[in-house]
Structures are given as structure tokens and as C-alpha cells.
Amino acid sequence: MKKIFSIITTIILILFIHQSTSNQTPQNPSINFDKTFYKWSQPFSETVHLIHTKHVNYLADPEKPMINMIKSFVKSFDPHSYFLDQKGYEDIIQSVKGELTGGIGIIVDNTKDADDEFLRIVETIPGGPADKVGIKAQDKIVEVEGEPVKGMAVDEIVSKLKGKRNTKVHVKVLRSDTTRMLPFDITRDVVKEPNALCYHFKGHDAYYICFNMFTENSINQLTQVIQKIQSQQNTKGLIIDLRNNTGGLLDAAIDIASLFLPKNSLVVITKGRQDKEIDRFYTKKDPILNRSIPIFILVNNFTASAAEILPGALQVHADKAKKDVTGQHVYIVGNKTYGKGTWQEVIPICNNCAIALTAGVYCLPDGSCVQGKGITPDFLIEAKMPPSQETIWYNTMFGRESALKNAIKQDQEADNPMLKDTTKKEDSKKEQEKSWYEKKRDIISSDYSILSTLRLLEMFDMAQKAYPEKMKTRADSITLLKSLYTPEDKAEIEEITIANT
């Protein structure tokens, strides 16, 4: 048996070395990789043999351990490379053919590391299968079909969530307000592409659009918003919200860039090994925005991949733009982005399996790479989190006169517990009756980051009228705006000495 394992390993090794060195010169650094592989092939063969012959739990079928071994080997090189077994690869093929039309209607955080114990749900699609069973944004998927997601790449998890329409998938999630796992059986269905959220802030004459991810329809949605801007001469600016946007289609990001940049503008460069350039992607259409208005792009630490390339490319071109050119005034607002600038290639191998390998990196038009660095905002705005349930409870029960026993109360509602409870129940009922979009509108209307961006937009409008000579370039505008509004800085204070009398 040991001899059989050694022969098999040797054959695999010979084929591996032949394939990897057939087109290489002896000076190629990958020869070191082959030597290391050869060095450890014998210990591997002996280990498998000993497990097979000595382990107390007799190994009748080594297929699953072998698959897990290959998965561990592939993912050890970087967090976005992964191995696809027969089912995973078949799911991808069927998905491309359109045979796998069932999903559960969630947008996930594709920045998950393979060793993370959960996959965060960024958003649920209104009316989708996950939304119907009660899954919420910020829930964390821990298991899919009884299998922990730890050790899985995002695409591997997504392929398990997808399936034929009307079939069920069992998931377990963790919710922030509970310590136990919540089980859900979700019936897969055809999920409508999520619509971008679009609003007009009347008091500020500004338009707002939010993309949770880039899809084929994204350019059409933004085009409609720009057409509305074109029809309103007094529009002060446009806010594009890419917070929690973990990417999506790169082609969609390039198409969106074409709405603002001149035709044939460079958007992104792909590079492979040893910084060798592979391809360049340019805009293919003339821009449709016919006047220069400020464009503020909101980002955070969950903005990743294609959602980093778009603001990065617009930022680079805006720095080089001349006065009064469309797309000149582009400003990045929020927190530093995630920094995922790699792309993966799915390569079929034997046994009807495949490997998704990180084959290169994305670079911005100026040659800089976002991988591991992210996009630094022009204006840092820290998000303000809503108070936790514990904070609300503490503020209610302590530090208030009304919380004291037998406290004197002046208003009727405080004196009448029945009236107070009824009011709370009615408010809760009204809140439950609101649609997903109504709840989202309420959140956006009071979002601190959005309100801060609107203030920046107003300051830009006033500065452009009062100090046009200081707003000629993007750099000039940033300098002036930062002198007027710097939310990240501390206030400068000086102590005043007061004499005791």
C-alpha cells in the first residue's frame, strides 16, 4: 500500500513539474517552488499511508480529507484564491448558462477572509426570499446546510446559497442583539436586481443615489438621475453613496465612469506577475453630464473592489482636469476604503474541479494600486453609530428626575401609564407597517455622513460664488473647503486664567 501511494505521488509530481517547467528557463524563480514540492511529496505520501494503515478511525474514503487538503493549500497563498470541488464548479457553470436561476436575495460582504467564522449580510433585497423569512442586514451567516462557513471563500458560500428555483437552503445566522444562532429555511427564487435608492434633497437642491453593488442596470439608474439634474438648472451637486458596496461588475463601474469622463479615458489597468501589464480599460461613450457640478462620493471601510476603482479613477482624472471641465470637481468623502484590488481567474482542472486563482491586480489610471491600500478620502467623516439598547436603557433609568421613585410628574402622559403604553404600541405598530423603502428613507434623511456631505456641498456652492479665484482646480477647492469645514480636527482651545475674589 505504501508503495502504491509513493507511485501515485511520484506520477503526480512528474506531471506537475513537467507542466510547470515546460515553458520556463532554468533561471525561473518557480524552480524553487518545484524543489520544495518535491522535498515534501515523500512526507505527504508517508503521512497518507500511515493514516490509512494505523489511525484508529479507519479511513475508508479519503476523498473529503483530500479535498479539504487542496482547499487549505490553495487558500494559503492569498484570501481570495480557492478550490472548487465538483459541485462548486458545476454550480458556476450552470449559473453562467442560466440554469441556476434561484437565489435568496442578499448582498454580502465579499471582503470576508477565508478564516473568518461568518459572512456578513450587507443588505437584503426587499421582497426577496431572505427578507420574507426575517433575515436582516448585518446578520452574520455562520452555517450553510450544516457546514460552517469558516474556511470558505465568499464565492464558494454564494454558490452553496444558490440553486434551482423552489428548492430550500438551510442557514444559521448570528444577530447582533442575541448570542444564539437563528436557523432559517429559505426557498430559493428568481431575485429581481436591486434598485438603486435615489432621492432629491429639496432644501439643498442636491440629488442622491446609493449603490449596494454594481450591476448591469446601474448605469441606467444613474443616467436617469443625471437626466433629472440636466433639467434642473439650480442643482448644486450629486452624492453617490458607495458605502458597504463590495464591488459587483467591473464593466458597470467603467460604464458609470463614462457618464462623467471624456470618451477613451483610461479607467483601470490590469497587471499580472512581476508587474507586467495585461490590459487597459477605457470609457467607450461620450459623457452625458453637460456641466460641471460637484460630485461627492461617499465611501467607508466596506467599499471594495470595483466600488474602489470608480472613485479612484474619477479622483485621478479630476486632479488633471482643467477649469470648468465636466468631472473636474469630484470629492471622496467618508472613511478609507477596504483595499481589495485583485482579480481571480477560474481555471478548470481534472476530476471536474476548478481553481479560482488570484491572477493579477487592478491599478488606477496613474499606475497606483488599491490592493492593500484603499482609497483615502479627501474629507474624513467618521460615521456616528445609533445608541445601543443598553445605552438607551441606562439613559432612561439613570440620571433623570423622572426615574426616581415617587418623582413628581407634571404631564398627563407621565401620570397615566396606560396612555403612555398605548402611545408606544401605536408608534411601534406604525413603524412595523412602514415598507422597506420608507424605513430606508427615514434612515437616510438623518444619516450623519450624508448630512455632513450636504453641508460640504452647501459650502462648495457658497465658496464658488464668494471665492471663484480659489476654486479653479480640485486641489484649490479642497484646500478652501478644509479651511471652512474640518470635522476630523479638534477645536483649538486656550485656557483663560480667572482670579479668585
Image (cartoon, grey):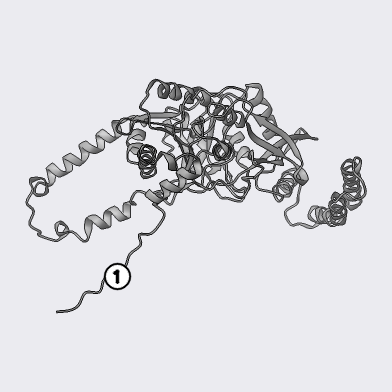
Query: How many discs mark residues in the rendered view?
Result: 1
Where residue 402 appears, as percent x and y from the top left, is 14, 56
- Residue at point 34% right, 29% down? 435
- Residue at point 22% right, 60% down? 398
Q: Using the rendered view, name the quadrant where residue 467 is placed.
A: top left
Q: Can residue 411 be seen in the rendering of this structure?
A: yes
Query: Which residue, given by chain and number where applicable, does mark 1 sit on?
Result: 495
User: Along the line of sight, which residue is nearer the eye, 319 or 209?
Assistant: 319
Q: Is residue 3 left or right of residue 133?
A: right
Where residue 392 appears, as percent x and y from the top left, is 28, 53
Question: Among all residues in the image, which is located at the extreme front?
Answer: 469
Q: Can residue 190 be seen in the rendering of this structure?
A: no
Q: Residues within 10 Å of mark 1 (few under 14, many from 20)?
A: few
Where residue 468 appears, as percent x and y from the top left, is 41, 38
User: Along the line of sight, which residue is nearer the eye, 439 or 484?
Assistant: 484
Q: Using the rendered view, name the quadrant where residue 182 is placed.
A: top left
Q: Is residue 137 left or right of residue 98?
A: left
- Residue at point 40% right, 51% down? 483
Question: Among all residues in the image, which is located at the extreme bottom?
Answer: 501
Q: Amino acid at mark 1?
A: Glu
- Residue at point 64% right, 27% down? 264
Query: Does 361 sit above or below residue 215?
Result: below
